[in-house]
Amino acid sequence: MVDVVCAGLPPDGARIHADVSVRAGGSAVNAAFSAAEAGATATVIGRVGSDPSGNFVVATLEERGIEAQLARDPDHTTGAAVAFGSSVVAHRGANAHLSSADIPELLVADALLVSGFALFQGGSTQAARAALERLDGRWAAVDLATPKLARAAKLDEVATIANVILATAEEAHAATGAADEEEAARILAARFAVACVKLGEQGAIAVQADNLERAKATPVARSSPFGAGDAFAGALLVALSRGEPLSRALELGCEAGARSAAAQVLGR
């Protein structure tokens, strides 16, 4: 995706001067940035358009030392998301046409992250499932993406091809119907080896078997709805892959999420 972040939303019909940033983004890209910052080798697999925006995403990944295995769609533009403060308008573009043919026959990796935007939305579902099924590695993670998608997700099916589930508090409530985040995490952990509930400024909780861990987040000013949760996921998975205990992996995830949010404010 290309992410466009505007400092505010003008009144209807008005024009204002405000900060606007344009960056390569989307869940996979943001998580890969975080994994690379943690010292891991990272690869992004996906689909972009045969347009300047697609070139921009590829060039940004290459500059960060991240491999871009991106199919180029001749008929659809690169996806884009535009944020006006906390309000977001998204166009899936080429993402909606990700196909199983775009996924390598074998994915050899310590960890794989698949976004619910790909797994639970039409057009890309089979490709997302193929990625999880073709993984030759220990950690296969799915992020639930939105409360609406979480509510409709068939988690028992997801659990046959993934062993890590990540959700915001709202997504965890929608997926489980639980009254609080800890209960939701335990319900999810009954299906997945690791269940993590992201709590924003309050940090995160995670459950692995009977072990529940909590981590606090460093308070930061945040002006963009993009990236922090993806950065959390990337750092968490790298830590788990290195054999870190769940408590430390959770701490590193929260630290990465805070850095991502602060970097957005600073325009990096």
Image (cartoon, rainbow, N blue to C red):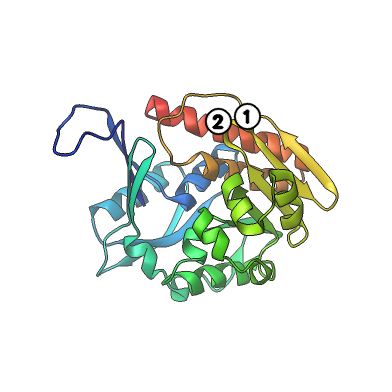
Q: Position of residue 243 (x, y in %)?
A: 77, 46
Distance (Cα) linking label 1 and label 2: 7 Å
Amino acid type indicated by mark 2: Ala
Q: Which mark is residue 258?
A: 2
Q: Residue furthest front?
A: 179
**75 relative position to 230: left or right:** left
Q: Residue furthest right?
A: 210
Crowd rating for badge 2 (residues with CA inside 10 Å; few <14, some 14–19, many 20+):
many
Res 143 → quadrant: bottom right
> Which residue is found at the position 36% from the left and 42% from the top?
87
**170 relative position to 25: left or right:** right
Question: Circle 2 sits in a helix, a strand or a loop, which is it?
Answer: helix
Asked whether the residues under the numbered discs 1 and 2 touch, taking CB atoms below 8 Å apart as contact, a structural biologist would say yes
Crowd rating for badge 1 (residues with CA inside 10 Å; few <14, some 14–19, many 20+):
many
Looking at the image, can residue 110 be seen?
no
Which badge, 1 or 2, is on the more N-terminal residue?
1
Q: Position of residue 237 (x, y in %)?
A: 65, 48
Q: Which mark is residue 144?
A: none
> Which residue is found at the position 19% from the left and 27% from the top?
17
Up-down: is 187 above or below 255?
A: below
> Which part of the image, by quadrant, shows the C terminus?
top left
Question: Circle 1 sits in a helix, a strand or a loop, which is it?
Answer: loop
* In-front residue for pair 63/3: 3
Amino acid type indicated by mark 1: Ala
* In-front residue for pair 8/231: 8
> Which residue is found at the position 40% from the left and 25% from the top?
266
Res 231 → quadrant: top right
Q: Position of residue 41 (x, y in %)?
A: 57, 48
Residue that badge 1 annotates? 217
Q: Position of residue 214 (x, y in %)?
A: 74, 36
